[in-house]
Image (tube, helix red, strand yellow):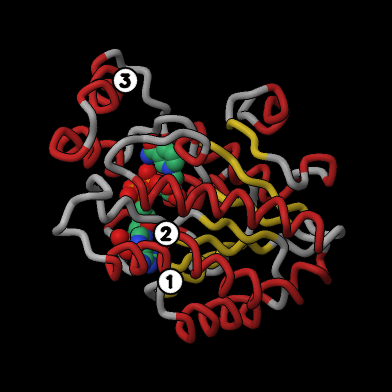
């Protein structure tokens, strides 16, 4: 039987690295990673999974580079069954009236967190239609909330959710699913704790500090398993939905 092929963006660290590890080690998949950086952890996976892992270096805001990375990934393994849109940035952080943040900063944010999704989807759709595959949008609860000091991030993730819903309607043979991973113990959370006080309301910032101090942040290894499993097995009944990784809909995709 052919092994499934999953393409994932932002696999150099955090959630993306955990998903990649899970796909390779727990789900027996072939994986194409698209990241700007080759971290020691990613290099280790390359050594361990020479045949089933293809790592491509690319800034996802670079349209031709992202398009050609996805085409290369598909040509390398001959198919594409899953696309995980995980790479994202928080920058620029700051209130909307912060004069140091230009409109171009907001546009650059949208190039990474939103317009890259369009490029990746367009490049993958023919292959995903053939395989009746799945797209997992790694979103956030902030897409539904107005988290202070994070306007660009909240807006781009809300746009991501909207795109996922629309795609479910346009592409009935493909599962299009947005997922909130909860507060996960990654570099992104560290940035929010370390620099959030300058940008956010004190109550919003305190939520991040408290979650860390109470030890309730999610382990990337656990949410990584769920995202990996969904990219391979999410049913059409979930298409168009926005799910939280630890809700009932995802129960059967959690590690036993
Ligand atoms: N951590 C949380 O609590 C949390 C909560 C809700 C949602 N999320 C979502 O989960 C996803 C992963 O977050 P994380 O916590 O793992 O974040 P992270 O540790 O900051 O990792 C972000 C990843 O995105 C990549 N990336 C950023 N900009 C890129 C670009 N222009 N081109 C290519 N790759 C780029 C980074 O790669 P480089 O090495 O190239 O920088 C890195 O691999 C994001 O979509 C985030 O919004 C996270």
Which residue is at 34% across, 33% downward? 185
**Image height of 167 relative to 73, above or below:** above
Asked if ligand 1 lies within 8 A of label 2, the reply is: yes
Q: Position of residue 144 (x, y in %)?
A: 52, 36
State the image quarter where residue 122 is shown: bottom right
In the picture provided, is 180 more to the left or to the right than 83?
A: left
Q: Which mark is residue 109?
A: none
**Image height of 245 relative to 170, above or below:** above
Asked if ligand 1 lies within 8 A of label 1, the reply is: yes
State the image quarter where residue 125 is shown: bottom right
Q: Position of residue 202 (x, y in %)?
A: 20, 24
Q: Which mark is residue 60?
A: 1
What residue is shown with label 2?
Answer: 10
Q: Position of residue 67 (x, y in %)?
A: 54, 81
What residue is shown with label 3?
Answer: 211
Cα gap from disc 1 to disc 3, whole angstroms: 30 Å
């Amino acid at each position: 039987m052919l092994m499934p092929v999953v393409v994932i963006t932002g696999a150099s660290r955090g959630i993306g690295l955990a998903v990649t590890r899970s796909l390779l080690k727990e789900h027996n998949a072939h994986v194409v990673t698209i990241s700007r950086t080759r971290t020691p952890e990613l290099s280790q996976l390359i050594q361990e999974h020479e045949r089933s892992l293809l790592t491509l270096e690319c800034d996802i805001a670079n349209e031709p580079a992202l398009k050609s990375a996805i085409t290369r990934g598909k040509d390398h393994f001959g198919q594409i069954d899953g696309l995980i849109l995980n790479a994202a940035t928080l920058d620029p952080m700051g209130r909307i009236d912060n004069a140091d943040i230009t409109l171009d900063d907001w546009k650059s944010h949208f190039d990474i967190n939103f317009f890259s999704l369009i490029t990746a989807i367009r490049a993958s759709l023919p292959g995903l239609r053939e395989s009746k595959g799945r797209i997992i949008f790694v979103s956030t609860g902030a897409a539904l909330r107005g988290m202070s000091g994070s306007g660009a991030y909240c807006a781009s993730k809300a746009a991501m959710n909207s795109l996922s819903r629309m795609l479910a309607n346009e592409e009935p043979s493909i599962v299009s699913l947005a997922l909130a991973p909860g507060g996960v113990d990654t570099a992104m959370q560290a940035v929010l704790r370390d620099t959030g006080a300058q940008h956010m309301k004190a109550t919003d910032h305190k939520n991040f500090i408290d979650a860390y101090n109470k030890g309730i942040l999610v382990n990337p290894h656990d949410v990584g398993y769920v995202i990996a499993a969904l990219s391979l097995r999410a049913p059409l009944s979930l298409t168009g939905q926005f799910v939280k990784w630890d809700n009932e809909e995802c129960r059967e995709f959690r590690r036993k």
